[in-house]
């Protein structure tokens, strides 16, 4: 298994979740463009990290084709 991709994916997912939580706390009435951009960016970063780690794990579990 390529642990580098799993570790990087987990770190990116945690950073994305941190940005997402910060944006939700500072959102206010929902008209702030910065908070809305942080919501979108945090969601995208968290999803990318999860997908990156997931594909690394799935690729390692699949083995070599025969």
Image (cartoon, rainbow, N blue to C red):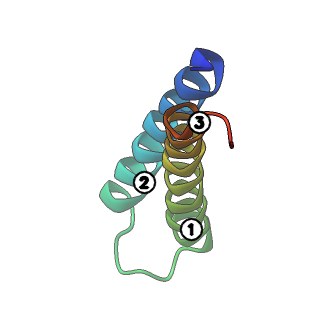
Query: For the point 56% across and 20% down, which residue is it?
Result: 1
Labels 2 and 3 touching (C-beta < 8 A): no
Q: Nearer the viewer, mark 2 or mark 3?
A: 3
Q: Earlier in the sequence, mark 2 or mark 3?
A: 2
Q: Which residue is mark 2?
A: 20
Q: Residue at x 52, y 27 (%)?
A: 11
| Mark 1: secondary structure | helix
**Nearer the N terminus, badge 1 or badge 3?**
1
Q: Is 31 in front, or is 64?
A: 64
Labelled disc at residue 40: 1
- On the image, the x and y values in percent for residue 34 come to 61, 64
Residue at x 54%, y 21% (from the top left corner): 7
Crowding at dot 2, Cα within 10 Å, few <14 / some 14-19 / many 20+, comes out as many
Give the labeled residue for mark 3: 56
> Could you say whether the residue bearing mark 2 is in a helix, strand or loop?
helix
Element at label 3? helix
Location of the C terminus (image quadrant): top right
Q: Is residue 14 above or below residue 8?
A: below
């Amino acid at each position: 298994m390529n642990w580098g991709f799993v570790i990087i994916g987990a770190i990116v997912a945690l950073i994305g979740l941190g940005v997402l939580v910060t944006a939700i706390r500072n959102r206010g009435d929902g008209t702030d463009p910065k908070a809305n951009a942080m919501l979108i960016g945090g969601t995208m970063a968290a999803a990318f990290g999860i997908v990156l780690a997931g594909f690394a794990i799935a690729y390692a579990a699949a083995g070599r084709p025969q």
